[in-house]
């Protein structure tokens, strides 16, 4: 088993490397760094000076594959290929190409743990409860328990997930007062805030998951190896637990992990200047499947907000605001939501609401350079020059710290490559 897993991991690693390099080659075959600069800067009249400045700030002024102006390992490392493609294999994501130019690695590191606190318990409980219920129905198949269990699953999947949220919050938070209706706390206190969204998400997906897994188990029950196991005298419980369950786990794990790409797509959407063609459908599905997940609501709202910002669609703008507000109800200290909500209010011309949103963004995440930058602009628009200068100073300090951290990681990576090349050259 260990050898099999190692081989699969080795194959997957090379597939990942190949896809990464092929994607880079195809992307820069179609697009040049100048095209990327024009798209991100916007406007019909973009000067070459603006393009050169944008490329210099983001490292696109270097050669794509080979830098002949450098010496030693820098010929390879001081290229767009290394910094935008090869470095990804060492989890060095660099900065986004958007106007905010945020450190993608920092964003992932600071935000992933709260999301995992909600996603991991839900993922495990969803598997255990759905598999347990479906195995129970299969064990008593063609009985009254199986019939009414299937009817209950159909009823549960027919009910909108919003119904579970509204009724669950009203019953357990307002009436019984067992758990808080919103908010978040660190440490063990987070359990009180995570319990309700985990249970409601589990309940909203239980009907569809149990029916799907039941169908998979019934399909396995008709296989030849099951009849052979029964012929050898194994009990029905042993046949289900040791044979049917093990062989049905592959499609179960595949379907259970289907929502993970939404999270990665959402991170890419945050870093990109333009929305991806598939993002709206994918994020809509994600928010429907995970209605109690603040990240899902935020990412779907972000897609609609970016789309509305480009097309000036009032419907998408209003829907994005609703999703942002829903995400804040689920997680009141979600700094990125306050930041995007402030930009939305600012686009509408509501300077007061924008200023309040940016203040909350800074309060939720004092280390966010972008939050300080937007708050500085909001103070400037309101006439508070002293406060604007103070926030801009905080932004500059944070940006210098972020840039220093990124440069340190790059130096360490180049040093690592140099050491590898020296070791290779000294080998007989």
Image (spheres, rainbow, N blue to C red):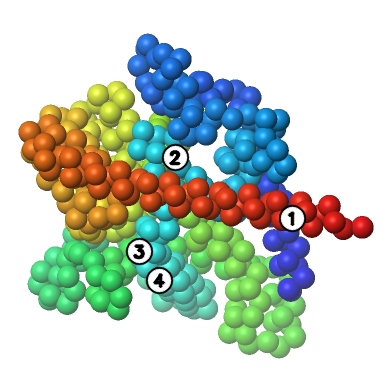
Q: How far apart are marks 1 and 4 (CA)?
A: 41 Å
Marks 3 and 1, the one that precedes in the sequence = 3
Marks 2 and 3, the one that precedes in the sequence = 2
Up-down relation of residue 157 to residue 59 (above or below):
below
User: Residue at the location (41% across, 20% down)?
Assistant: 50
The disc placed on residue 96 is: 2
Marks 2 and 4, the one that precedes in the sequence = 2
Label pair 2/4, CB-CB below 8 angstroms:
no
| 398, 174: nearer the viewer | 398
Label pair 3/1, CB-CB below 8 angstroms:
no
Q: Distance between the residues labelled 2 and 1?
A: 29 Å
Residue 265 locus on image (x, y percent): 46, 45
Badge 2 element: loop
Residue 427 locus on image (x, y percent): 87, 58
Label pair 2/3, CB-CB below 8 angstroms:
no
Q: Distance between the residues labelled 3 and 1?
A: 37 Å
User: Residue at the location (66% across, 55% down)?
Assistant: 416
Badge 3 element: helix
Circle 3 crowding by C-alpha within 10 Å: few under 14, some 14–19, many from 20: some
- Please tell me whether mark 3 or mark 1 is closer to you in this view: 1
Q: Which residue is disc 4 drawn over?
A: 121
Q: Which residue is disc 1 drawn over?
A: 420
Task: From the viewer's perspective, tell me whether residue 197 is left or right of residue 216.
Answer: left
Q: How far apart are marks 2 and 4 (CA)?
A: 31 Å
Badge 1 element: helix
Q: Which residue is disc 3 drawn over?
A: 114
Q: In which quarter of the image is the C terminus?
A: bottom right
- Inspect this view and state whether residue 33 appears: yes
Marks 1 and 4, the one that precedes in the sequence = 4
Circle 2 crowding by C-alpha within 10 Å: few under 14, some 14–19, many from 20: some
Label pair 2/1, CB-CB below 8 angstroms:
no
Q: How far apart are marks 2 and 3 (CA)?
A: 22 Å
């Amino acid at each position: 088993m260990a050898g099999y897993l190692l081989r699969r991991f080795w194959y997957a690693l090379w597939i990942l490397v190949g896809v990464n390099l092929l994607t880079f080659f195809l992307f820069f075959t179609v697009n040049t760094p100048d095209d990327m600069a024009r798209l991100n800067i916007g406007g019909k009249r973009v000067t070459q000076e603006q393009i050169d400045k944008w490329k210099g700030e983001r490292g696109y002024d270097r050669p794509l594959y080979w830098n002949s102006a450098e010496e030693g390992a820098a010929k390879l490392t001081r290229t767009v290929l290394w910094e935008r493609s090869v470095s990804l294999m060492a989890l060095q994501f660099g900065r986004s190409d958007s106007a905010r130019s945020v450190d993608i690695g920092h964003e992932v590191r600071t935000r992933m743990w709260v999301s995992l606190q909600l996603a991991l318990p839900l993922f495990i409980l969803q598997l255990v409860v759905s598999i347990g219920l479906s195995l129970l129905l299969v064990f008593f198949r063609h009985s009254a328990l199986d019939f009414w269990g299937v009817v209950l699953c159909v009823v549960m999947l027919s009910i909108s997930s919003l119904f579970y949220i509204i009724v669950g919050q009203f019953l357990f938070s307002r009436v019984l007062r067992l758990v808080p209706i919103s908010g978040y706390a660190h440490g063990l206190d987070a359990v009180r805030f995570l319990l309700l969204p985990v249970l409601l998400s589990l309940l909203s997906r239980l009907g569809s998951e149990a029916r799907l897994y039941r169908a998979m188990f019934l399909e396995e029950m008709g296989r030849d190896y099951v009849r052979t196991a029964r012929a050898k005298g194994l009990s029905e419980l042993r046949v289900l637990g040791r044979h049917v369950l093990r062989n049905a786990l592959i499609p179960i794990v595949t379907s259970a992990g289907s929502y993970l790409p939404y999270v990665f797509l959402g991170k890419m959407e945050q870093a990109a200047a333009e929305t991806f063609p598939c993002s709206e459908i994918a994020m809509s599905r994600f928010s429907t499947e995970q209605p109690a997940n603040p990240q899902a609501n935020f990412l779907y709202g972000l897609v609609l907000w970016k789309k509305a910002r480009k097309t000036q669609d009032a419907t998408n703008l209003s829907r994005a605001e609703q999703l942002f507000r829903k995400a804040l109800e689920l997680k009141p200290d979600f700094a990125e939501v306050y930041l995007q909500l402030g930009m939305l209010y600012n686009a509408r011309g509501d300077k007061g609401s924008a200023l309040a949103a940016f203040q909350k963004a800074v309060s939720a995440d004092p280390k966010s350079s972008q939050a300080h930058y937007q708050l500085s602009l909001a103070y400037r628009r309101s006439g508070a020059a002293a406060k604007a200068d103070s926030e801009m100073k905080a932004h500059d300090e944070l940006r210098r710290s972020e840039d220093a951290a990124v440069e340190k990681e790059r130096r360490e990576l180049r040093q690592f490559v140099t050491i590898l090349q020296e070791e290779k050259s000294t080998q007989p």
